[in-house]
Image: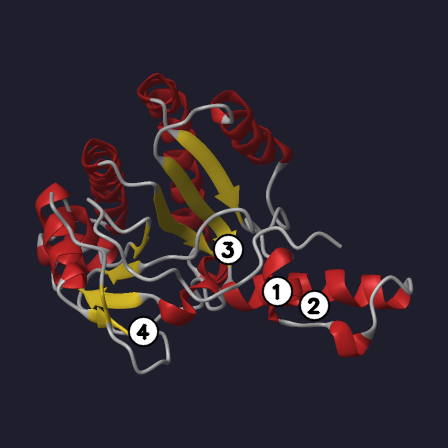
Amino acid sequence: MTQQGASRLPEPATPRAMPRHVAIIMDGNGRWAKARGLPRSAGHKAGVDAVRRTVRAAHDMGLEVLTLYSFSSENWARPRAEVAYLFTLLKRFIHKDVAELHAMGVRIRIIGSHEGLGPDIIQLLRQCEELTKDNGGLTLVVAFNYGGRQEIAHAARMLAREVAAGRLSPDEVGVEHISACMYAPDLPEPDLLIRTSNEKRLSNFLLWQAAYAELVFVEDFWPDFDGKLLRAAIEEYAGRERRFGGLVAGKARAARV
């Protein structure tokens, strides 16, 4: 098995304009709409506008990787009409925005399961990745039909097959083997994880990769998120000391944005 993307403690912090990888749980679309007497669909539509602002801001700041939690494996439990509308918004975003993102040099990666997705959605997601695969700018990771526990189970199945085939001993299985079986093992683990709407939980998002991420909880609902709030979260991150379980503190990568 390949060891690519093996899990390791992050390198000691060095002065950089940004953390390498920021991940965001985009929460609060429904409550944003309710506070304005609008249907939940209006909140989701406004949330797409916030995605556009945030991706543009991350690109302009020089961020290396931005991961957005767009549709969780648990979201299937929502009303059927709401799920259908979320898929409609996804299709609109792909048709309207991907060409512009490609022109900006953004590379799109999709992580998650294809289970339950229609062939048209799977094809659109693959087309996004294929079109932008050679771009060298911001890597935009879209966690779609994604669940952290499901991803770990996926890795466990891959390793079980290796053991059953005799290519790996059970006693040899280590952290690096599990990391190599994640959906995107070539990407750096998140330095900073942001959640909007003042909720303080991970909600099954990047459970393995976020082991050493700094967490920042923002009071604003996702539809109100923008570059200013992203900068504020990065500035909070930059002021923290990161020990990674050790005794020697390291200043988070400086945010000169």
Left or right of 98, for residue 52: left
Counting residues from the start of the chain, the first of labels 2 and 4 encountered is: 2
Percent x, y for residue 12? 33, 62
Residue under pointer 2: 156
Of the pair 212 and 55, the residue shown nearer to us: 212
Q: Which disc, if any, is residue 244?
A: none
Counting residues from the start of the chain, the first of labels 1 and 3 encountered is: 3
Residue under pointer 4: 201
Distance Cα–Cα, label 2 vs label 4: 24 Å
Of the pair 204 and 63, the residue shown nearer to us: 63
Marks 2 & 4, CB-CB < 8 Å contact: no
Distance Cα–Cα, label 1 vs label 3: 22 Å
Counting residues from the start of the chain, the first of labels 4 and 3 encountered is: 3
Residue under pointer 3: 146
Of the pair 30 and 210, the residue shown nearer to us: 210
Q: Secondary structure at mark 4?
A: loop
Mark 2 residue type: Ala
Counting residues from the start of the chain, the first of labels 1 and 2 encountered is: 2
Distance Cα–Cα, label 4 vs label 3: 16 Å
Marks 1 & 2, CB-CB < 8 Å contact: no
Percent x, y for residue 232? 10, 54
Q: Secondary structure at mark 2?
A: helix
Observer-side mark, 3 or 2, equals 2
Label 4 environment density (alpha carbons within 10 Å; few <14, some 14–19, many ≥20) = few
Percent x, y for residue 91? 43, 30
Left or right of 3, for residue 17: left
Distance Cα–Cα, label 1 vs label 2: 13 Å
Q: Secondary structure at mark 3?
A: strand
